Amino acid sequence: MSPIPRTALFAASLLVAPLAAATETASIEEVWSAWGRQEWDSARALAEELVAERPDDAHARAILGYVLDAFGEVDAAAPHLAAAAESDEVDALRLVALVHGTRYSNLVFSDRSYDAPVELDAATAAYRRWAALEPASAYPLQGLAWLRSSGGKPKEAVGLLTVAVATDPLADEPHGDLWRYLNTEISYDELASFYEGLALVASSDEARGRCLQYQGQLYRFQGDKGRADAAAAETATDRISRLTDAISSYRRAEPLFDLATAADPALAETSLTHEFACRTGVVDAYADMGDAAATRKRLTETREALVEKTEVGSPVFVNTVDALSFALFRLAGGEEARFVDAEKYASDMDEIRALWKWACSLVDDRAEWWNNLGFFAREAGAYQESYAAYERCIEFAPDSVRYVNDTGLIQLYHLKDDLPRAEELFRRAVEMGEEQYPAVKDDPSLEWEMRSAWGDAMLNLGLVLTEFGRYDEAEAALAKLDALDGGRADLAQAKTALDLRRGDVDGLKQTVHDLLSADAIDRDTRFLLVSIGRTLKDALETDPNDELAALLAEIERALSNSRPPNDESGR
């Protein structure tokens, strides 16, 4: 028989695992070791053997009571738990409280008929006895708060948890339980004020530092919530108001982390993590507002502080640079902005490109950063710089299908001064995709990206082979892509370009007529026809051809006759 699983929402610090580490008794360690391995029967046998050898040991009897109760043998567990409850051993009392408290907490979900008042009284008595034995411990008070919460008395639970935190600010778990009540029983500002007062009367520098750091975290999370609420705001006025409040919360948090580190230097790493999350939060909030001047001002301040206060290449440094770049990208309007305001977009790309040049000059072995520099240099029209960055990128990530393909892409679409190198890169990316795709094809989160990168490499290989006039090889490369992802519009364009280059007008006509033969032109077919039409238009601009012009006219008529209301595609 397997014991029933236990769940105790507010008893993370009271679970059994920490007890094994706290004891020096080898046989007790063996019980908990077997229990941790889920060797239930073995753990029970060891616990029974332990009590047989030491019948007056309250801790041993509490362990056996706990194990028997988990097996559902409540009556057998009772005398052992009762004996342990009369002891002055903290470890024994902790287990007694856990068993009775779990029974009381789980009454709603349990198929066992416990007497709620009896279980509550037993658990309460054990926690109070424990508290009397260890008055400086936060954990028995945390346990009492758990009981109040289980009994539907959240305000009393909050009161006990604040006492627990004040009793020992260095005990982490009570803080977490207290924070569960944020925005229900206690507000961010109320809890922050509580930590502020606690820091003033803290009995040690460590406790003061911890309280200041928690106060800062509260303001940080209040800022995060403000930004999340702003994203869901229904009006622009409400959105700006919430973003303004978020900025205020982040700014209140920032200096607290310096104060926390000054009180306790051991908090330096976590304090820096929170501080720079706040700094980037402010930058993000201004970017969300569209306030370019404030975004850039705060970004510059953050970048300067980053060099001054963090280790170059550290996680905080890396995450902050990533966040700053993303904020600037959003400020520019994202990738779609190139179609809306190309001039502004290009100017902003220069700024982001400068950020990545700076970052790569400090940390020169991060492939993703060189990739970012390559991308934004490309967006800014600095193709030689982009190509150099991509080449540097694949030095550090030679097995990335995406990065290797994108390196060749700069040659194919922009530089065109070393197309044999582009072919080499595309072939390499295709071969790596063939090797790597089987390992990810059953994982949707990985499959899509690999299929996209691998497909791009096949497409680009077909295009560069078309440029070389090696049409049969190009057709084979595009056929592979057709088998993998035949619905791509850029594949239709590539096939059209290939037919045009090899003079296969009949093949191109057949492709178009196959698409037009359906009873109705669906959305995907329209997309493919529009793509083919654009390729034909480009070809006719440089090489007028009556046959191709007639085919283009046929496509345009079909698109016009099938266009849904308000659809602009194909115009």
Image (cartoon, helix red, strand yellow):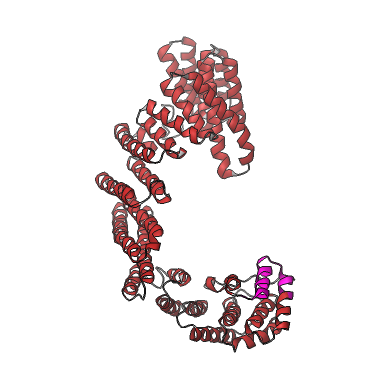
* Res 258 seen here: yes
Task: Locate the N terminus by quadrant.
Answer: bottom right
Q: In the image, is 174 to the left or to the right of 399?
A: left
Q: Nearer the viewer, residue 171 or 246?
A: 171
Name the residue furthest bottom.
Answer: 86
Q: Position of residue 327 (x, y in %)?
A: 35, 45
Q: In the image, is 101 to the left or to the right of 154?
A: right
Q: Residue at x 37, y 41 (%)?
A: 362
Q: Position of residue 348 (x, y in %)?
A: 31, 37
Task: Locate the C terminus by quadrant.
Answer: top left
Q: Nearer the viewer, residue 500 or 50?
A: 50
Q: Give the total number of marks visible in the rendering.
A: 0
Q: In the image, is 221 to the left or to the right of 500?
A: left
Q: Nearer the viewer, residue 336 or 273?
A: 273
Q: Nearer the viewer, residue 71 or 149?
A: 71
Task: Tell me where the magenta segment starts and ends, as one range.
Answer: 24-45
* Res 521 seen here: no
Q: Is residue 59 above or below residue 434?
A: below
Is 363 within the magenta? Answer: no
Instruction: Write down the quadrant of residue 410 in the picture.
Output: top left
Q: Position of residue 26 (x, y in %)?
A: 66, 73
Q: Residue at x 56, y 14 (%)?
A: 470
Q: Residue at x 72, y 75 (%)?
A: 46
Q: Residue at x 41, y 59 (%)?
A: 270
Q: In the image, is 232 to the left or to the right of 252?
A: right
Is 35 within the magenta? Answer: yes
Q: Position of residue 63 (x, y in %)?
A: 65, 78
Instruction: Write down the quadrant of residue 120 in the picture.
Output: bottom right
Q: Is residue 501 above or below residue 372?
A: above
Would you say the magenta stretch is mainly helix, strand or loop?
helix
